[in-house]
Image (cartoon, rainbow, N blue to C red):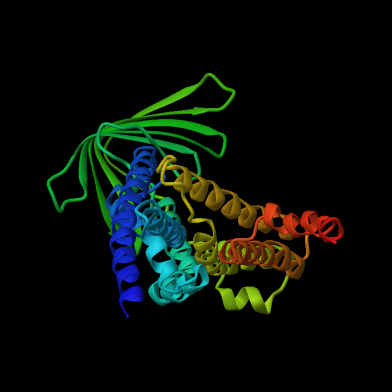
Amino acid sequence: MLFQSSIRRELARSFGATLVVLITIVMTIVLIRTLGQASRGYINPQDVMLLMAYSALGRLPTILTLSLFIAMVGTLSRMYRDSEMVVWFTSGQGLSTFLKPMFRFSWPVLLIIALLSIFVWPWTNQQTQEMRERYESRGDLDRVAAGQFQESANGNRVFFIDRDGAKGQKSSSNVFIASNENGKSAITTARSGQLENIDGAQVLLLRNGQRLESQVGKSAVKISEFEEYGSNTANAAPPSTDTTDTKLQSTLSLIRTPVRNNLGELAWRLGLALAPLNFVVLAVAMASVNPRGGRSLNLTFAVLAFVVYNNLINLGQSWISSGLVNFGNFFLLTHGGVLLVALAWLVKRNANWTLKTALRPARGHPSLPDRTRIAA
């Protein structure tokens, strides 16, 4: 049918353009933030692109929802502005009939949003957390970079190397180690150092160096020179397997353990999946524009409505987690309330009902007996 095909074709163009713009903006922000974390040593610089991919998947439900909402509002507003709506209305198409082509176009996007928010979101959080913990729990010498002072994982040692060895070799030159363990302070310097595995343990062999030892609180200093000195290095701690964080738990585990924190996270995930349905109805109801008015007023109102609705979902998560609101009551009041408002708005505009037209019969009825009496 020409009516539905023309709307879906224009929606596809508008949705694609909006999605590309929003993804570009979000990925730029994520890239700047991820590079900042890598420069401060919180994440592995080699994993920047992978972390960005996980971050994009986690934010994709919100991006898709906003893109779909803006595309629908922009398309319908353009049709009002160019008087295409007048043509469709005079051909017998009411405003409510626009819901069918809207849902026929958006159902694949709605399905993707639901899958991403319910299943992909916890998986991306788990992968990101594992990568961070793996990088934070690496061995002390794995943290060292040439020309930089680096503190060990337990804070008892400080390492410095002047230059790394050749590629593929675990050797360095001009090594400096300052340690403070068991009440003893020591400073060790060596011309070179190399990592070796001895009896299954990782040992740092220092060559041609000097060691200064002192007891904390005492002035005596012991100075010794060595041709070869072995120092045990801290092994990497295994990554944490703690899954108490609700963001890391699967949706099924949240349902099986309905405590307040889990219910709050579950309400947030289901809210991301249900909100696009309300936005489709809301887009049809609010996409009316005065041809003489500004073109960006409807889009501004759409973005404002999206921000308010999205913030309500985030606030609902904290309210449910703290016990201020019940899980079922929040769903009925928030998502059900928005749906009722959108449907009432759509019915009002579809019937062209206004307060003035509702009061007009009440004003005209009392005057009828007067006109009849005068005619008599």
Q: Quadrant of the C terminus?
A: bottom right
Q: Is 22 placed above or below 250 here?
A: above
* Residue at the limit of the structure toward the top, as seen here: 219
* Residue 289 pos. (x, y %): 46, 50
Q: Report whether residue 128 is seen.
A: no
- Quadrant position of residue 41: top left
Query: Which residue corresponds to the image point at 75% horizontal and 60% vertical from the top-left?
Result: 361
Left or right: residue 333 versus residue 194 is: right
For the image shown, how many numbered marks are present on the structure? 0
Q: State the residue in front, 38 or 170.
A: 38
Q: Is 60 placed above or below 110 here?
A: above
Q: State the residue in front, 350 or 27.
A: 350
Q: Quadrant of the N terminus?
A: bottom left
* Residue 25 pos. (x, y %): 34, 46
Q: State the residue in front, 192 or 140.
A: 140
Query: Which residue corresponds to the image point at 53% horizontal and 56% vertical from the top-left?
Result: 286
Q: State the residue in front, 173 or 329.
A: 329
- Quadrant position of residue 368: bottom right
Left or right: residue 4 versus residue 206 is: right
Query: Which residue corresponds to the image point at 21% horizontal and 41% vertical from the top-left?
Result: 172
* Residue 363 pos. (x, y %): 79, 54
* Residue 22 pos. (x, y %): 35, 51
Q: Report whether residue 167 is seen.
A: yes
